[in-house]
Structures are given as C-alpha cells and as structure tokens.
C-alpha cells in the first residue's frame, strides 16, 4: 500500500525592517516622549542599529545602539549602547553567548557599564535633595545546562561582578552620608535556575484584537555570593531569589512574580522584597483584571526610595506624590471591546478602574491613596510596537502631602499594569 504524501503550503510576506520609533505619554502629570529609528536587519545581515532622542521623567538623552547576534560564530552576541544625557553619560558594552534556547548547553557573557547621572530624593511631594551619582561595573556571567525535559530546563549559574558607586553633593539638601557615599564590592556568586515552559495563547488580555502568549510554568532562580576584602572591595555577602508562576482559573488565568535581594554588610543592607499578582477573567468582549503588588525595603541605600504615585499604579496622583520605603497597591479594571478591527487598522475599547495604595516609612510616613476613573483604549492591530494606546482620566479620592486632589489625565502606549 502506498502512503499518501502530505502537502504543506507556507505563505510568507515581506516586512519593513527599518522602523521609525516614536512615543508620547503622560503619567503622574509628567509628559515624556521619544523619537528615533531602528534597523533590525542591517543590509540583510541580521545586525541591528538604532538611534533616538528621549525625554523621560528625570532627564533628556540622545542614544545609539548596535547589536550583532552572530559575531564570528552563531549566537555570539555583541551589543553596544551609548547615551549622552542632560545630567551625564551612559555607556555599556556586552559580549558573549546567552542562553538563546531552553536546550542551549552553556552560556558565557561579559558586560561593562558606566553611568553618571543625577539622583533626586523627594519628601512631601517635592524635590528635597540632589546628589551626583557615578556607577561603574564589570559583570562576567556563565551557566551550564543540567537537565532538559518537556516542561523546561535546569541550569547551574556563576558570576563575578565588580561594582562601585559614588555619591557626590549636588548642591541641594544634605550631603550624602559619609559611611555609604562610596561602595565597592567584588561579588563571586553561584546559583541555580529553573526555566519553565508552559505557554498558553489568549485573546483580549492586554491587547485588543490580538493573540498573546503567556507562560504559566514555574520558573525560579537562587543566587548566593560573597565579596572578599580585596583592595578597595569591601567584605560582604549577597542573596538573590526570584520566581514566577501561573495557573488557569475559571474563565481565565492568573500570574504571579516575586523577587527578593539583600546585601549582608554589618547586617541586612539594601534588602528589597517585591511581588506582583494579577488575575484575568476573559468574558468576551469583557476582560476583568485584578492586580496586587508590593515593594518592601529595609535599610535601603541612601539614594533609593519607593514612590507611590502615577508611575506605580495610582493614576489619580502626580509623580512622587508620596515617598517611603514600602508600599502596597491594588488595582481593578474592567475592559470592553466596543469596535472590532476597522479596515485591519484600528480597534476601540473602553475601561473603568479603581486604584488603592498604602505607603509608609521615611520620609513621608503613613499615607493612604485611592482613585477611580475611566479610559479609552485604541488598538493599532498592524503595529509591531506600541500597538495599544491608552488614555485614562482618574479622580483622586484622598489628598496627597501637598493637599492636591481632583482629576488627572494620563496617556501612553500599553496598559497601566
């Protein structure tokens, strides 16, 4: 008996690899924007090149990058990034072979970094301190595949990291504390990682009229390190733990991530715990989303603060509304698709939401914030980037430290959380 052959038809289409990039957003009462161009297949070689101008919440920058994913040999990645900022410079050079696939047998990468910028501290909703910060770092990371199964991969990890941070008086507020104004460490670390793989495809989640992929598998990474007293390097320990997981629930799914880190240097120092949990209920054309997130710090480095504001889930409040060393944020949002794809270009939807948050710790003490609002969602169904435009109007229900209440408009690409 002769077996029948199978006929497979594959359709392909050309696409532009030169992309003009631009964005405009307003969060927390601060407008940011960017514009530039990126080429993702330079003269057909797979190399990437781009440049741009960007205004973010703290600085204006002119940047350029170059990337070669197969320098001399396959999967050997070269990446160069440089930026001339209004308050300093940023330079980064990376070379090596990453874990480019779950079954990649090994990885080895090196990164050199230099960053000079202004660090601003806030109290009572206003800028209180300005320091000049200088960061230098060299990182060498490597890993080896231990086992591979249909649900993921297990890896052994190792790294050598030299970092130095200097804080200098910027002319506003108190000078940096002498005992922590300069920190240098040489960490030698070992770790273990599990990269899970359990993907699902859902529609009407964070995008409009688009399929999106989500990984429900449990993944985690544990790393322990020590810095010897060697030259300028201080003796210290370090611990890093992170993980993520997901699960199916009735009419939807849920995702959770957690990360914890600390430095052991005369006790716990710059310890930070962060977690984010969100659940999606897909009731087409409705999507109901609930989210809870927290960031909790202990004995943070002097340049570190944890704001609660329009950049951290509170859409009715201005930038740096409240500062502390820990906060909780809860969000609920109902999204509905109103106008499906028009001429294969645009889709329209609306949203109603509520945000609530608590902040406490220095410098502002305990604060409770809450807001409610409505928003417009515009899906650009053929865009490769910035495919969702969001516009929200929120009403704050409690005053901030400056006594501000009322309505606040925010807009950007992508969902607020």
Image (cartoon, rainbow, N blue to C red):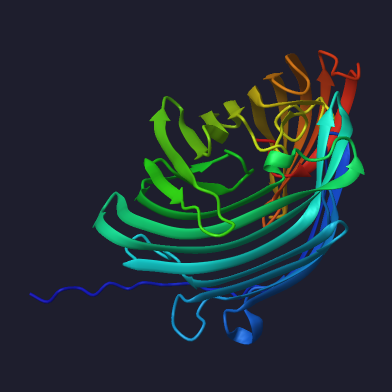
Quarter that holds the N terminus: bottom left
Q: Quadrant of residue 354?
A: top right
Number of numbered tags placed on the structure image? 0
Q: Height in image: 263 above or below 190?
A: above
The answer, for residue 383, to whether it is visible in the render is: no
Q: Tell me which residue sits at (91%, 16%) in the image.
A: 403
The answer, for residue 125, to whether it is visible in the render is: yes
Q: Height in image: 392 above or below 22?
A: above
Provide residue 264's location: percent of width, then percent of height: 50, 38
Near-viewer residue (94 or 24): 94
Q: Residue furthest left?
A: 1
Q: Quadrant of residue 200?
A: top left
**In this rendering, would 235 be left or right of 153?**
right
Near-viewer residue (233 or 71): 233
Provide residue 206's location: percent of width, then percent of height: 61, 40
Provide residue 332's location: percent of width, then percent of height: 64, 22
Q: Height in image: 184 above or below 125?
A: below
Quarter that holds the C terminus: top right
Q: Height in image: 381 above or below 8?
A: above
Provide residue 189's location: percent of width, then percent of height: 42, 53
**In this rendering, would 241 be left or right of 147?**
right
Q: Tell me which residue sits at (32%, 56%) in the image.
A: 156
């Amino acid at each position: 008996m002769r077996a029948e052959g199978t006929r497979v038809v594959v359709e392909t289409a050309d696409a532009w690899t030169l992309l003009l990039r631009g964005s405009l957003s307003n969060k927390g009462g601060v407008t940011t924007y960017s514009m530039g161009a990126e080429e993702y297949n330079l003269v057909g070689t797979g190399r990437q090149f781009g440049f741009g101008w960007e205004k973010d919440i703290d600085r204006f920058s002119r940047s350029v990058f170059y990337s070669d994913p197969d320098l001399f040999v396959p999967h050997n990645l070269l990446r160069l990034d440089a930026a001339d900022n209004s308050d300093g410079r940023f330079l980064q050079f990376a070379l090596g072979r990453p874990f480019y696939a779950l079954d990649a047998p090994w990885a080895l990468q090196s990164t050199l970094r230099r960053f000079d910028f202004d660090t601003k501290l806030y109290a009572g909703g206003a800028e209180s301190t300005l320091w000049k910060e200088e960061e230098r770092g060299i990182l060498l990371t490597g890993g080896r595949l231990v086992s591979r199964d249909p649900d993921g991969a297990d890896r052994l990890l190792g790294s050598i990291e030299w970092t130095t941070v200097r804080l200098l008086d910027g002319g506003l507020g108190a000078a940096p504390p002498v005992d922590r104004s300069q920190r240098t460490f040489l960490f030698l670390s070992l770790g273990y990682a599990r990269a899970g793989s359990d993907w699902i495809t859902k529609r009407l989640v964070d995008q409009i009229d688009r399929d999106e992929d989500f990984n429900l598998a449990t993944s985690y990474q544990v790393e322990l390190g020590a810095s010897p007293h060697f030259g300028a390097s201080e003796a210290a320990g370090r611990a890093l733990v992170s993980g993520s997981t997901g699960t199916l629930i009735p009419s939807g799914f849920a995702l959770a991530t957690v990360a914890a880190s600390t430095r052991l240097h005369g006790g716990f120092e710059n310890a930070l715990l962060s977690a984010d949990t969100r659940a999606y209920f897909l009731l087409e054309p409705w999507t109901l989303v609930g989210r809870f997130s927290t960031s909790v710090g202990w004995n943070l480095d002097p340049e570190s603060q944890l704001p609660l504001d329009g950049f951290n889930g509170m859409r009715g409040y201005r930038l740096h509304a409240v500062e502390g060393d820990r906060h909780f944020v809860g969000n609920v949002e109902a999204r509905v698709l109103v106008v499906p794809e028009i001429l294969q270009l645009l889709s329209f939807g609306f949203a109603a939401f509520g945000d609530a948050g608590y902040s406490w710790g220095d410098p502002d003490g305990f604060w409770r914030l809450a807001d409610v609002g409505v928003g417009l969602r515009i899906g650009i169904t053929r865009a490769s980037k910035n495919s969702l435009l969001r516009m929200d109007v929120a009403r704050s229900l409690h005053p901030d430290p400056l006594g501000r209440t009322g309505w606040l408009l925010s807009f950007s690409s992508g969902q607020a959380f």
